[in-house]
């Protein structure tokens, strides 16, 4: 976007938020104004505003009134808060001062959900902007940019995702493996960094995805079949036949229809040969298991199952 503003020939200001603190972002705005091509950028540099409300007023005064200009604000989600204070300040500045100037205000953010919220119904900036979601480069554009034939261009599009930042690191005419060796050996290359940021944005740390995935038992077992030998429930009551002492003769006793003696009846067909009265404890078909723990209220009984 900064290159687009440079090629337009219009005076422009490019500001990228850091999210460190409001004071740090405002200080960064003054530094970006010093490097901008606005004719009156010195106003914003000398004023050093302490709030975004004052910053937008000074910015409006620095914009030329007789020619078009461009103001680009990148990483806008860093400036947005839960209370919507920045959105309200932006709405007031646009309605009162910025809209009167021939300025193109571009707000950029990689978080699609927050950028959609900025222009959604009920928010202060609603219907004051037009949403544009730039898509990735298609295989034809990737092949033209990298100088590749059609077949390698498709592979390059799959590897880079069509992202221009990653494609810019691909040497013109280089092969796929040559690019992968160079990109994966550099920890700050756009390919691994973009993948890491995408995962961090889609699966934030508070979701604890690694903890959830590591809690899933392996080999198709379930949490119910993983706890048949829990010590807090004592030894299984139906773990096996009792060994009679020498000389004692015992008549064989028929196995009960329901290993668990809970009075609740079984109400529908069971996929296994030995139905159990609690369908919620039915293990998955084909899963290896040796016993199942009845977890209904005040039951806590362990009963064996057959494959």
Image: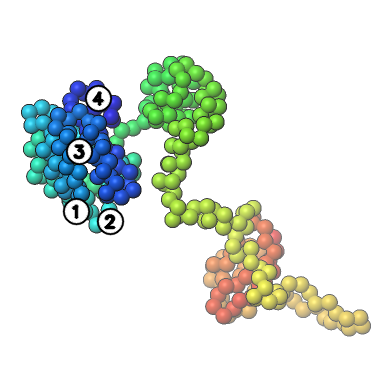
Label 2 element class: loop
Quarter containing the C terminus? bottom right
From the viewer's perspective, is residue 26 above or below residue 279?
above
Q: Which residue is drawn at the image coordinates 75% and 76% (left, top)?
A: 254
Q: Earlier in the sequence, mark 2 or mark 1?
A: 2
Q: Nearer the viewer, residue 243 or 128?
A: 128
Q: Nearer the viewer, residue 112 or 190?
A: 190
Q: Which mark is residue 6?
A: 4
Circle nearer the viewer, 3 or 2: 3
Circle nearer the viewer, 1 or 3: 3
Quick check: 179 left or right of 130?
right
CB atoms at circles 1 and 3 under 8 Å apart? no
* Residue pointed to by mark 3: 45
Circle nearer the viewer, 4 or 1: 4
Query: Could you give the CA–CA distance between mark 4 and mark 3, rounded to whole angstroms?
Result: 21 Å
Q: Which residue is drawn at the image coordinates 51% and 29% (left, top)?
A: 183
Would you call the spot at circle 4 few (<14 residues within 10 Å), some (14-19), or many (20 or more)?
A: some
Q: Which residue is drawn at the image coordinates 64% and 66% (left, top)?
A: 227
Query: Could you give the CA–CA distance between mark 2 and mark 1, rounded to whole angstroms?
Result: 14 Å
Q: Earlier in the sequence, mark 1 or mark 3?
A: 3
Q: Earlier in the sequence, mark 4 or mark 2?
A: 4
Q: Earlier in the sequence, mark 3 or mark 2?
A: 3
Quarter containing the N terminus? top left
Query: Could you give the CA–CA distance between mark 4 and mark 1, rounded to whole angstroms?
Result: 35 Å
Q: Which residue is drawn at the image coordinates 65% and 76% (left, top)?
A: 233
Would you call the spot at circle 2 few (<14 residues within 10 Å), some (14-19), or many (20 or more)?
A: few
Query: Could you give the CA–CA distance between mark 1 and mark 3, rounded to whole angstroms?
Result: 34 Å
* Residue pointed to by mark 1: 122
């Amino acid at each position: 976007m900064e290159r687009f503003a440079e090629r337009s020939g219009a005076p422009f200001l490019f500001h990228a938020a850091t999210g460190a603190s409001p004071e740090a972002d405002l200080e960064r705005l003054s530094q970006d104004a010093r490097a901008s091509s606005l004719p009156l950028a010195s106003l914003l540099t000398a004023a050093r505003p302490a709030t975004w409300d004052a910053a937008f007023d000074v910015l409006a005064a620095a914009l030329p009134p007789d020619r078009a200009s461009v103001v680009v604000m990148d990483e806008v989600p860093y400036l947005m808060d839960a209370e919507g204070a920045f959105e309200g300040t932006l709405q007031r500045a646009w309605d009162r001062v910025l809209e009167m100037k021939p300025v193109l205000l571009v707000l950029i953010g990689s978080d699609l959900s927050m950028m959609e919220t900025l222009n959604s119904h009920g928010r202060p900036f609603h219907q004051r902007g037009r949403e544009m979601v730039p898509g990735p480069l298609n295989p034809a554009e990737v092949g033209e940019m990298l100088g590749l034939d059609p077949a390698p261009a498709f592979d390059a599009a799959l590897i880079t995702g069509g992202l221009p930042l990653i494609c810019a690191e691909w040497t013109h005419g280089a092969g796929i493996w040559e690019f992968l060796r160079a990109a994966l050996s550099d920890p700050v290359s756009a390919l691994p960094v973009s993948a890491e940021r995408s995962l961090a944005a889609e699966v934030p740390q508070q979701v604890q995805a690694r903890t959830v995935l590591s809690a899933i038992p392996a080999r198709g077992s379930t949490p119910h079949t993983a706890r048949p030998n829990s010590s807090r429930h004592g030894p299984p009551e139906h773990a096996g036949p009792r060994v009679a002492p020498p000389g004692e003769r015992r008549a064989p006793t028929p196995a009960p229809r329901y290993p668990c003696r809970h009075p609740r009846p079984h109400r529908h067909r069971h996929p296994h040969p030995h139905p159990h009265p609690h369908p919620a404890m039915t293990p998955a078909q084909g899963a290896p298991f040796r016993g199942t723990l009845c977890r209904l209220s005040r039951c806590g009984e362990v009963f064996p199952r057959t494959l």
